[in-house]
Image (spheres, rainbow, N blue to C red):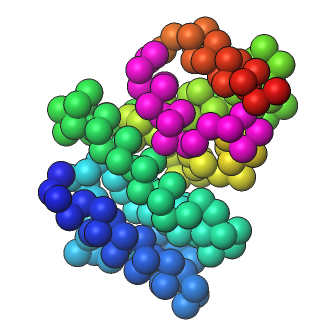
Amino acid sequence: MSHTFHTQLYRIWQSAVDQYQKGGSSPSTIVQEQDLSLLSGWGLNRMDIFDFAEDWCLHQEPDFYTFLLVHYERWRFFVEKQNSIPFSNLLDPKTLPPKDQKARGIAWLPRILPKARAKLRGELPPEVMYCCGGDREFFKSNNIHPAEFLRIVCFFGDDDSEIIEWVVKRKSSLA
């Protein structure tokens, strides 16, 4: 990553937002061809940009800073854990737990765990977004930043019980 990662990512995100507002309604119409190799070198793809730009245009969230922090965590995982080599598997959306499933009484937690892992690995299929409306509700109700959650998932790896315990403790600190 260069010292201009954040400014380059902002330029790409802002261009995508501008294109979406002008009627661009697909990843191929809002992400410029010349930016694909740069994104690929960071472990990102068109959908990473499109999903966040679209939700910003439609819902005014997540903001650019959240987009930046989330994708910084993806970049770190890509470089540190994947040695800048993309994984080739995609998460099967049918394997995601139901939206109403709970873990230790916390809604959405079973669903967001595999989504966070897939986001870190660059394995989200186009129809699944990390930081979608349901995810954002989970983050707000538990006082967790989306990038912070990725960092916790990276730290604890596949140990769901440790991640769930961390979320339970965070939630109880709100009371």
Q: Where is residue 49 in the image (x, y as percent from the top left)?
A: 44, 63
Considering only vertical position in the picture, is 122 above or below 24? above
Which quadrant of the view contains residue 141? top right
Residue situated in front as seen by the camera: 126 or 68: 68
The stretch in magenta equals 140-157
Which quadrant of the view contains residue 110? top right
Considering only vertical position in the picture, is 2 above or below 8? above
Considering only vertical position in the picture, is 157 above or below 14? above
Instruction: State the residue at coordinates (41%, 25%).
Output: 154
Residue situated in front as seen by the camera: 55 or 33: 55
Considering only vertical position in the picture, is 68 above or below 16? above
> Magenta: predominant secondary structure element?
helix
Instruction: State the residue at coordinates (56%, 11%).
Output: 162
Q: Is residue 159 visible?
A: yes
Q: Where is residue 116 in the image (x, y as percent from the top left)?
A: 52, 34
Residue occupying the far bottom of the picture: 22
Query: Would residue 156 be counted in the magenta stretch?
Result: yes
Q: In this view, does 100 lie to the left or right of 145?
A: right
Which quadrant of the view contains residue 14? bottom left
Number of marks in picture:
0
Residue situated in front as seen by the camera: 164 or 18: 164
Instruction: State the residue at coordinates (18%, 52%).
Output: 1
Q: Position of residue 68 (x, y in %)?
A: 41, 56
Q: Where is residue 66 in the image (x, y as percent from the top left)?
A: 51, 55
Q: Which quadrant of the figure contains the C terminus?
A: top right
Query: Would residue 46 be counted in the magenta stretch?
Result: no
Instruction: State the residue at coordinates (72%, 34%).
Output: 142
